[in-house]
Every structure is written in C-alpha cells, then in structure tokens.
C-alpha cells in the first residue's frame, strides 16, 4: 500500500480543509436509495451473494476518487492512499454479535468475489470485533442493516473528528414497481469533500450497478 503525502502549501483544497478541520470541524451524512435491479439480476444469474456485490460497488467507486481516499496516517501526516480495501461487518445470528472482516481489493469482479468467499470461509465464523487479523491502515468501513429499510441514518462519533475516510451503511432492500432499491447512508468529512463530490460518487455508484446488469445482458461474464 502506498500513502502519498499532501503538500498543503500547494493543495487547492487547503482553505477548505483548514476551515472544516481546524476552525469548524464538520462531518455530514446523506441517505439515498440506490437502484440495485442490475445487481439483483447478476446475483440471480450467477448464483452469487448480494452483500459482496454491494461491497464491490462501493469499493470500486471510492477507489476512483482521491477525495475519498484522503486520510491522516499513524504519524499524523495528511495524504492519499493509492488504494482502499473494504472492511465490512458480518453478523453472527447465534449470539447476535458482529465482526469486522477485510478483503483484498481487485477491480475484477469475479476475482474480488473469490477473495470475499475465501475470507468468509476462513474467518467468517470467528467471534470478536476483528475476526480477520492484521487489518491494514488503508481500509474503509462498510456496514449493513438488512433488517430495516430506513430513510435516514447518522453515526454520532464522539472522538476528535480527525477520521477523514467515508463510512457507508446499507439498509434492507425493497421492491418499488419494477425496481429493487436499497437505502445507502454515506458519512463523510467536510474537510476533504463537499456535496459535489458526494453527489458524483452517488451517481457513479448507480452507474456501476447499472453496468453490472449490462455484463449479464451482453453475456460477457457468467459464473
């Protein structure tokens, strides 16, 4: 993993970063419905699982934009990770707890699904917050509430407000007319991204979902 330091003196975002990090420390969240009809079609055709497909979509979109890979490392330095890996929650029905797992990123969908399945098989049954050891610094969090369809979701993090990476939470998907929709909450730090950047990310997430349907429709990729 590579962490490219930011030269704040020449960084175009410096005045905004200083304002929302040092003067008025500010995070914000937005909840939207994503059309996952294409994801459901791929899932049914390929007999794959929904959750890793949703994780893939977010990770692909996040890795396309530096503002969502901007972070402060363990030395207190500001920079950008070249690649982020997803760290996602897995629920244990037997004792109603959850664990965090992380998976190596691969832009190839089938390769990523294979990585996910390997991690679930090896670590999915482990209890405790961190079921897979040695979580890298270049991970970002994804969680899921598949029991509830929500219209808003906000994390209240009582810390020093220096965590800059995005946090994603999926809800329970539902059917509306001929579409399958899923609520997605996105929490970000205003120091590194504005409403424009989040809106672009949302549009790109939707496009990736649509493109996965095209993969099936064109018979380019079948499991």
Image (cartoon, grey):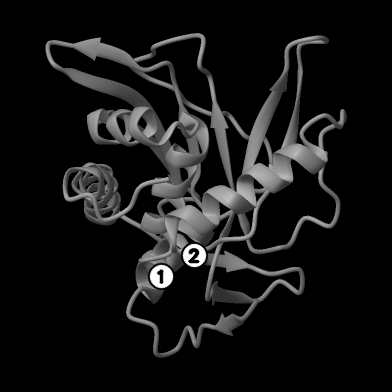
The residue carrying pointer 1 sits among few (fewer than 14), some (14 to 19) or many (20 or more) residues within 10 Å by Cα, namely: some
Q: Seen in the image, is 69 located left or right of residue 85?
A: left
Question: Residue 40 appears in which quarter of the rendering?
Answer: top left
Foreground residue among 30 and 205? 205
- Secondary structure under the numbered disc 2 in the rendered image: loop
Please state the horizontal and vertical placement of residue 98, each as a whole percent of the image.
74, 24
Give me the residue at 17% from left, 43% from top. Answer: 217
Give me the residue at 48% from left, 83% from top. Answer: 8
Q: Seen in the image, is 137 located left or right of residue 128?
A: left
Give me the residue at 44% from left, 40% from top. Answer: 53
Pointer 1 residue: 66
Q: Distance between the residues labelled 2 and 1?
A: 5 Å
Relative to 72, say whether 8 is above or below.
below
Foreground residue among 157 and 104? 104
Relative to 25, say whether 108 is above or below.
below
Relative to 191, say whether 181 is above or below.
above
Pointer 2 residue: 69
């Amino acid at each position: 993993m590579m962490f490219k330091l930011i030269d704040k003196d020449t960084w175009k975002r410096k005045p905004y970063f200083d304002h929302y990090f040092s003067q008025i420390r500010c995070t914000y969240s937005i909840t939207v419905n994503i059309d996952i009809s294409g994801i459901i079609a791929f899932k049914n055709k390929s007999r794959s699982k929904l959750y890793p497909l949703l994780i893939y979509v977010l990770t692909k979109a996040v890795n396309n934009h530096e503002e969502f890979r901007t972070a402060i490392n363990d030395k207190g330095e500001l920079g950008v990770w070249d690649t982020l890996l997803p760290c996602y929650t897995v629920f244990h029905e037997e004792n109603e707890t959850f664990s965090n797992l992380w998976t190596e990123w691969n832009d190839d969908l089938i390769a990523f699904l294979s990585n996910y399945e390997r991690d679930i098989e090896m670590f999915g049954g482990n209890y405790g917050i961190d079921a897979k050891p040695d979580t890298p610094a270049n991970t970002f969090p994804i969680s899921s509430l598949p029991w509830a369809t929500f219209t808003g979701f906000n994390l209240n993090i009582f810390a020093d407000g220096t965590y800059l990476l995005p946090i994603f939470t999926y809800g329970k998907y539902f059917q509306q007319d001929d579409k399958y929709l899923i609520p997605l909450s996105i929490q970000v730090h205003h120091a590194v991204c504005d409403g424009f950047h989040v809106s672009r990310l949302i549009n790109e997430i939707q496009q990736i979902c649509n493109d996965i349907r095209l993969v099936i429709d064109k018979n380019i990729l079948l499991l």
